[in-house]
Amino acid sequence: MAPREHAHPALCDVELVTVLSALAEPTRLRIVRMLAAMEGERAWKDIDLPIAQSTLSHHLKILRNAGLVQNRSEGTRCYISLRDDELESRFPGLLESVLSCRDGLVPEGTRDA
């Protein structure tokens, strides 16, 4: 049986609003943070979140369609990696800015008076 192919959008076709929308959901942001904290790829089974496998699959599909992650199948295993170099080329500084923000904190000087 041939490995399952995953469709990955070309980042030149991905709009900023699509990326930001994918990152706006806390579980997906957490997944991206996990992937950013490590080098290379990670097996789906190693993504340790208290959610059902079907829910994880849903979130990973949204991240893939937004151009944030790349999937690769090998036998019965599926691996995922962050497309950080490609994202940096398409949206310079975006991923670093999003990942450096802490949950619930507003950067100093940006609150309404």
Image (spheres, grey):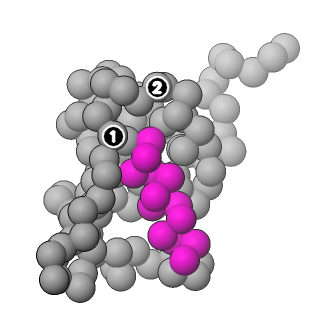
Snapshot quadrant of residue 52: bottom right
Point out the tag, 1 or 2, that comes first from the N-terminus: 1
Q: Give the CA distance from mark 1 to mark 2.
A: 11 Å
Residue 39 coordinates in the image, percent (x, y): 18, 58
Name the residue located 29 percent from the left edge and 59 percent from the top edge: 6
Give the residues in magenta. Answer: 54-66
Q: Which mark is residue 95?
A: none
- Give the answer, above or below, for where 91 lies relative to 87: above
Q: Which numbered mark, 1 or 2, is in the foreground of this view?
A: 1
Magenta stretch containing residue 64, yes or no?
yes
Q: Nearer the viewer, residue 87 or 61?
A: 61
Report if residue 37 is visible in the image: no
Q: Nearer the viewer, residue 76 or 25?
A: 76
> Element type at marker 2?
loop
Name the residue located 41 percent from the left edge and 30 percent from the top edge: 14
- Give the answer, above or below, for where 109 lies relative to 102: above
Residue that numbered label 2 is attached to = 15
Q: Residues within 10 Å of mark 1 (few under 14, many from 20)?
A: some
Residue that numbered label 1 is attached to = 9
Quadrant assignment for the N terminus? bottom left
- Give the answer, above or below, for where 107 lies relative to 72: above
Quadrant assignment for the C terminus? top right
- Give the answer, above or below, for where 48 lies relative to 95: below
- Residue type (three-letter) at the residue carrying disc 1: Pro
Q: Nearer the viewer, residue 13 or 52?
A: 13
Q: Residue furthest front?
A: 1
Name the residue located 39 percent from the left edge and 51 percent from the top edge: 64
